Amino acid sequence: MSVNGGAMTQDFIEYPKLMERAVRGVVRETLAMVAERGLPGMHHFYITFRTRAPGVTIPDYLLRQHPEEMTIVLEHQYWDLDVTDEAFAVTLSFKGAQERLVIPFDAVVGFVDPSVKFGLQFGPAAGGTATIEAPAEPDAAGATPPEPEPEPPPAGGAGDGRVVALDRFRKK
């Protein structure tokens, strides 16, 4: 319910769901561009997703290692990136073996491009919270993790990036 001139009205338009879909569209459009043209410049992505979300397809051994969430990196070693309206698929190398992953956009809980200090975080379920953040700089030990499933850089740590929380637009 929302307050409008003192009267309570029901949100039949469902603005929070529309906002969530629009922000997830940024991830979809970004990956579609990269699938078509490759990664430009120094751009690379940390993508965190719920491994047990409907439609996620990953090998059983990765599911055992990451029973709830997993972060993949799209930088140097990824192949056959395919993007549809609902999901993306990509082949990555895990300990020398190439594996095909299928990840619906509704399963994505985080998307970070540390090269330009851009990040999105989503709530754990569809219709959850989305925020836009500037992630902290990667540590001095090296910006490129050796395996595709590292933790993403902490978000918002530098204090100089904008954070837009969609919670304030949600029904209370």
Image (cartoon, helix red, strand yellow):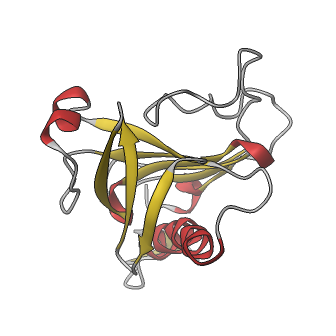
Expressed as whole percent of the image width and height from the top left, the position of residue 14 reads 41, 77
Q: Residue furthest bottom?
A: 13
Measuring from the top left, give residue 30's x and y in whole percent: 61, 69
Residue farthest to the top, as pictured: 141
Q: Is residue 13 left or right of residue 114?
A: left
63 and 90: which is toward the camera: 90
Image quadrant holding the C terminus, namely bottom left
Residue at point 43%, 39% (across, down): 71
Residue plotted at (80% across, 57% down): 41
- Relative height, residue 125 to residue 93 (above, below): below
Left or right side of 5 for 63: left
Q: Is residue 127 visible?
A: no
Give the vertical position of 42 relative to 2 (above or below).
above
Apparent side of residue 7 relative to residue 88 in the rendered image (left or right): right
- Tell me which residue sits at (51%, 71%) in the image: 28
Question: Which residue: 60% across, 48% down?
Answer: 75
Nearest the eye: 164 or 93: 93
Residue 112, x across and y down, in percent: 61, 46
Residue 135 screen position, x and y as percent: 70, 37
Quarter of image, res 69: top left
> Does any portion of residue 59 appear in the rendered image?
yes
In the foreground, 19 or 3: 19
